[in-house]
Image (cartoon, grey):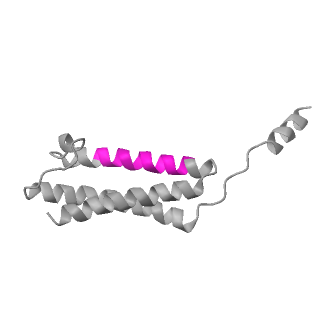
Amino acid sequence: MGTFVLLVALTQAPALPPAPSSVFKAGVVAVVASAVADVVTTTAAVYHGAREANPAMRPFVGSTVGLAAVKAGGTAAVLTAAYGLRRNGHPKLATGILWGVAAGWTAAAIWNATR
């Protein structure tokens, strides 16, 4: 009886999602790299007299560790959402979100670097 229950449980287990595509993996790298670039360029720009444009981030700009912690939390949230979407059958949406966030944070880093 126990073997039968185990076999039934194994046959009803959900299928594993396919491995992430190379575009998805590159999107993960792009999100992390753009987050790091945003923190580094924000810190440098503020050091040289610029002001944080994002009102939600202003309280954290005085501390590089605080800014990095908030950005790490945002990065973790984006990656968690993307992996969840991919796992639940929405790989294109997950990949699009990764690349959209990476584009936004890269634009912010470029903006910071030009100030």
Q: Name the foreground residue: 40 vs 101.
A: 101
Q: Which residue is drawn at 49% across and 58% down?
A: 96
Give the residue at x 44% y 61%: 99
Above-or-below relation of 99 to 60: below
Quarter of the image for the N terminus: give it: top right
Q: Where is residue 64 in the image (x, y as percent from the top left)?
A: 20, 49
**Residue 73 lies in the magenta stretch:** yes
Relative horizontal placement of residue 40, taking residue 102 as reference (left or right): left
Furthest residue toward left: 49
In this rendering, the count of numbered labels is 0
**Where's the C terminus, which quadrant?**
bottom left
Relative to 33, 28 lies left or right: right
Q: Tell me which corner region of the image, top left, top right, bottom left or bottom right, holds residue 47.
A: bottom left
Q: Position of residue 59 (x, y in %)?
A: 18, 40
Helix, strand or loop for the magenta stretch, by majority: helix
| Location of residue 100 (image quadrant) | bottom left
Residue at (46% x, 51% y) in the render: 79
Residue placed most toward the observer, 108 or 33: 108
Image-quadrant location for residue 14: top right
Q: In this view, does 97 lie above or below 61?
A: below
Identify the residue at the far right of this view: 1
Question: Residue 107 appears at what percent x and percent y?
Answer: 29, 62
Residue 6 horizontal/vertical position (percent): 84, 38
* Residue at figure coordinates x 15%, y 59% from the top left: 44
Which residues fall within the magenta stretch? 69-84
